[in-house]
Image: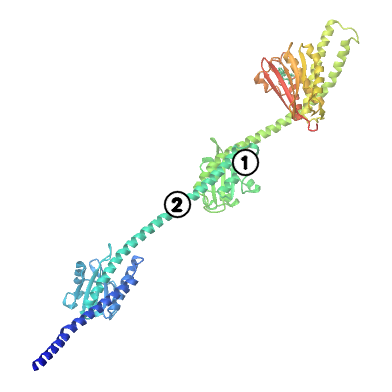
Amino acid sequence: MAAVVIGAAGAFGAYWYLKFKCVLPIESGREASQQAFGDFTSFVRETLERAYAPEQAEHYGDLVNYYLIRLHKAFPDSSMLVFEKGRGQWQLVNYLKNFKMEPKLLTSYKWSALDRSSVEGELLRFDDVRAGDYQAMEELFSVFDIKSALLCPFQPSGGAPERLIVFGAGSPAQFDAAQPYLRFIASQLSSISRVSDRVFELRKEADGLRNEVNAVVRELDVAGSRLIQRARERKALYEVVTRVTGPGDDEQNGCAAILNIVAKIVEADIAASLLFDEAKNELVVSPGSFGITDADRMLYSIPVSNQASSSVRTFLTRKPFITADAQNDPDVLTRYAKLWDVHSLMIVPICLRDRIIGVLRVGSRRIDFFTPDQLEFLTIIADELAIIIEMVTLYENISRKAQELAQLNKLKDEFLSTVSHELKTPLTTIKGFVSVILSGEVGPLNEQQSNFLAVVDQSVNRLTHLISNLLDLSRLNGKVEMEFQKTDLKELVRESVSTMQLKAREKKVSLSNAVDKELPVVQADNRWIGQVIDNLLLNAIKYAGSGAKVSISGTDKGEAVVICVEDNGPGIPPEEQKMVFDKFYRGRASINQVPGTGLGLAISKSVVEKHGGKIWLESKPGLGSKFCFALPVSKEN
Ligand code: ADP
């Protein structure tokens, strides 16, 4: 029994012994490590939650700080120092807590332990820092009251200097626990540095690209506005060229128009052409300038001898001139720049082929306003301006000549009219007396006397015919009033044919009337239109010659009545056809053989046109001629 009791007591004792001695320590160790593991896990989780990649390289220090703060929270009694290696020495770049006096940052230290840890890339543990060669750190460690230290290296990426955390404490009690924390932090700082580096690189690349894109956009902007400017200049040039080559009825305004366009395109306040006046040997502002009053224009004329003037120099050298501020440029006569109130100024030569005729002067009230591109544009415009200036000069010359001619023509008409009138009266008297003498009423004539007087009579007839033609012409030129009335052309033709029959018979010409039976009525002055028909018939009889056939036709063409006189005479050579309606023109073949004045067709043309009609000729040499005229049908039928 006792043995049983003793055995039981022994077992009980053994149980508790084992429990206290072995099991309980193991269990508490397991719990402690579970606790430590839990702490570490939540440290990692919380730290990662707030971790970030710095925006810029300079912010890396803040990140390191963040980790140190987290670490210090987990190990409040310890100190954390961060060193960075530079030029063989270690500089203190960051620290946290537990110092007695504020240490100086960026102080260099040379503790071989730091090098060793860095080279091995491993944690180094110094339970008693004074046991080793630590003199270099003695002072710093005393500031932080560090007796034991854990060294943990980490390597930021790329070419960044090596770094190292010194985890310092009064004793190594917490070193085991701190190691995973330090390893975690070191690896985090290394990899974040690597990620950040890549981010920085990408950002740098992006910035570079953005800058490049911006530069390209700026260039495009510049090129775009240049293109727009060029397009505007092209358009202006087109307008100018159209002015120069277009219908010439307004050349006088052409210069003003060009100067206007130029001023608008280069946004100038004045644009003027200064032309060389040979008589005065001066450059003179021509009319039509833009932005200059006539009074100011008159004030501006410069002797070509005055080489201080930029306009004169451009005129003499033919070199374009540009200045940013004419009022403060020693190369410019500032009084003229002030007179016109301009600062920026461009002057280009105006050359007509090889000859310089003046300069184009363009100014702006703004300083430094014009560009070399605009100067080039102006040079091109100046060439066009030269052409228009020449056209204006020609136009003015021609107008002057035309006026002189018109005046002369008027004088001639008046002279002819007066002379004809003066001649007509004595001729009528001569003709009257010659007829009386020829009739024998005042005594008998011998044969020779009769023949001579017949020649006189013929000559008087020709002279009378010429004079009456001249009078007709001068009346037609003098805007004679037509007496329009409803006219049956068939009737006029019939009268004319019957008058001409005698002449035709004399010339052995057969004359036939082939006018339509019915013709619409036209508005005509019977005397003048009758004269046209007479004239055409007389010409046909005269020029077709003996044995020829002449016929007159009249046709209703709806809107008009067409009367044609056709003969089978010699016809008119093509080169003469367009001249037969000119005053005093006589055909080469007829000039010496058939008497005439060269006025009949000119008068006919004028009469028909005064009726709103047309006259024309169809002729083939050797086959005959056909003269036609058309008169519009009267709307009051
Ligand atoms: P004129 O008959 O007095 O010379 P016109 O003006 O009537 O003047 O005619 C001008 C010219 O036209 C004539 O000189 C003649 O050469 C030519 N001409 C006119 N009619 C005919 C015709 N029917 N046939 C050939 N030539 C003609």
**How far apart are the alpha carbons under marks 1 and 2?**
38 Å
Residue type at mark 1 is Gly
Q: Quadrant of residue 208?
A: bottom left
- Residue 95 visible in rendering: no
Furthest residue in direction front, as rendered: 1
Q: Nearer the viewer, residue 2 or 578?
A: 2
Q: Nearer the viewer, residue 300 or 415?
A: 415
Q: In the picture shown, does residue 73 fall above or below 620?
A: below
Residue at the spot x=70%, y=18% of the render? 625
Along the horizontal axis of the image, is 211 left or right of 179?
A: right
* Residue 224: image location, x then y, percent: 49, 50
Along the horizontal axis of the image, is 134 left or right of 388?
A: left
Q: Nearer the viewer, residue 124 or 380?
A: 124
* Residue 419: image location, x then y, percent: 80, 24
Along the horizontal axis of the image, is 195 left or right of 452?
A: left
Furthest residue in direction bottom, as rendered: 2
Name the element at disc 1: helix
- Marked residue nearer the N-terminal end (1 or 2): 2
Crowd class of label 2 (few under 14; some 14 to 19; many from 20; radius 10 Å) = few
* Residue position for label 2: 219
Residue 631 circle label: none
Mark 1 vs ligand 1: CB under 8 Å? Answer: no
* Residue position for label 1: 254
* Residue 273: image location, x then y, percent: 59, 43
Q: In the picture shown, does residue 597 fall above or below 93?
A: above
